[in-house]
Image: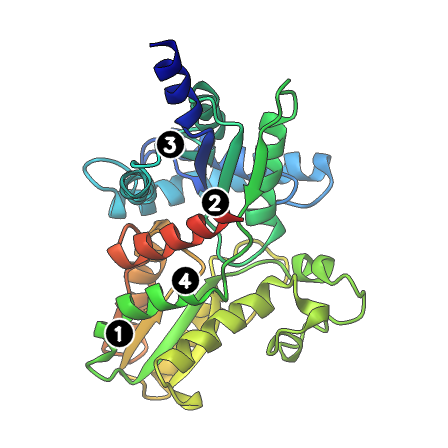
Amino acid sequence: MKNSRKQTAESKSNTGILLINLGTPAAPNTREVRAYLRELLSNGRVLDINPLGRWLLLNFLILPFRSRKSANAYRKIWFEDGSPLLVYCQQLKIALAKQFSAEQIPVELGMQCGQPSLKSAVDQLRKEGCDRIIVFPMYPQYASSSYGAAVEDLYKEILHDWNMPQLRIIPPIFSDSRFIEAWAKIGLPFLENKPDHVLFSFHSLPIRHLQKSDHSGNWCKNDGACCLELVNENRNCYSAQCYHTAKLLAAHFDLSAEKWSLSFQSRFGRDEWIKPDTEQHLTELAERGVKRVIVFCPAFVADSLETLEEIGIRADELFRKHGGETLTLVPSLNSHPEWVAALTSIIRQQLAG
């Protein structure tokens, strides 16, 4: 009997899987959105200015005006069972847990802002006895404000653990063939009707974030051309990685150069952000006579406010206002079986490493 118990303990896996995403308000109202934005924008990697300036900007400009506006936007896309981002991430967690159930490898989801918190996810893995954690920050392209912030938040969470877990952090998957293939299989049915144009819209960033990522100090020219090809000098550049993802998808769909383009969305404030801006670009496409456009958002692996409301509602209205006829948003990867299979493969590769 003692030997049986010993074998059971030794055979039980000490590995866990941790999914990290940005997070979401607890409810689509001004109070909860304000709390969410305060937590998000207090991060020095997100709003990378001096602490006093960040506090003043946050409390006197952003929170008083943006909270109510964002709450109205959230109400337009809120599901009966909660925020779309949280619902889809939870569904992905459940689907992955089934894939790893035979090995008794637990899967947890932690949000950098809001619930379930990153702390609660790590605590649960601690209770499971996990001393090795495969970590997937759910940001395909590297940005210090997203992927970098997720990794920093995780390190802070385990910093004071007496028994530090071994972390295997999955690198950005912007060019991973499994990631590209999953997007391609989801998007292919939307291209069967031969749209006039395919747009790949990515979350934007302030230009200074790109300049900070230039380790050479002289590559980033802020002219767009320096991002068109992924080379050693711009290997950490978010914009260059976005271009690379878009080019891989366009090639997969066999799109000619004039049939697709790339733009950047979700900008705010007066700083200079990556261009072209999605809203302005869609306006120009419509005014040039483009009637039917398909939009992919490959910076997001789960649908959220930025995809469902900003593109699916506002961008659609803008496009039609300027002469376009239909704008179709391709659903994100969410918990689609192709994505579950792709991510399972990516995680298993890390398990074997």
Q: Residues within 10 Å of mark 4 (few under 14, many from 20)?
A: many
Q: Residues within 10 Å of mark 3 (few under 14, many from 20)?
A: many
Residue at 61%, 21% (x, y): give it. 163
Q: Which residue is mark 4?
A: 179
- Between tags 1 and 4, which lies in front? 4
User: Closer to the N terminus: mark 4 or mark 3?
Assistant: 3
Residue at 70%, 70% (x, y): give it. 232
The type of residue carrying mark 1 is Leu
- Between tags 2 and 1, which lies in front? 2
User: Closer to the N terminus: mark 3 or mark 1?
Assistant: 3
The type of residue carrying mark 2 is Leu
Q: Which mark is residue 351?
A: 2
SS for dot 4: helix
Q: Answer whether residue 329 is visible to the viewer in this image.
A: no
Tell me which corner region of the image, top left, top right, bottom left or bottom right, holds residue 21: top left
- Vertical relation: 193 (above or below) 317: below
- Vertical relation: 191 (above or below) 73: below
Q: Nearer the viewer, residue 286 or 46?
A: 46
Q: Which mark is residue 188?
A: 1
On the image, the x and y values in percent for residue 299 come to 45, 59
Q: Nearer the viewer, residue 271 or 137?
A: 137
For the residues bearing labels 1 and 4, Cβ distance under 8 angstroms: no
Q: Nearer the viewer, residue 20 or 131?
A: 131
The type of residue carrying mark 3 is Pro
The type of residue carrying mark 4 is Phe
Tell me which corner region of the image, top left, top right, bottom left or bottom right, holds residue 223: bottom right
Q: Nearer the viewer, residue 332 or 46?
A: 332
SS for dot 2: helix
On the image, the x and y values in percent for residue 12 come to 40, 26
Q: Which residue is mark 3?
A: 106
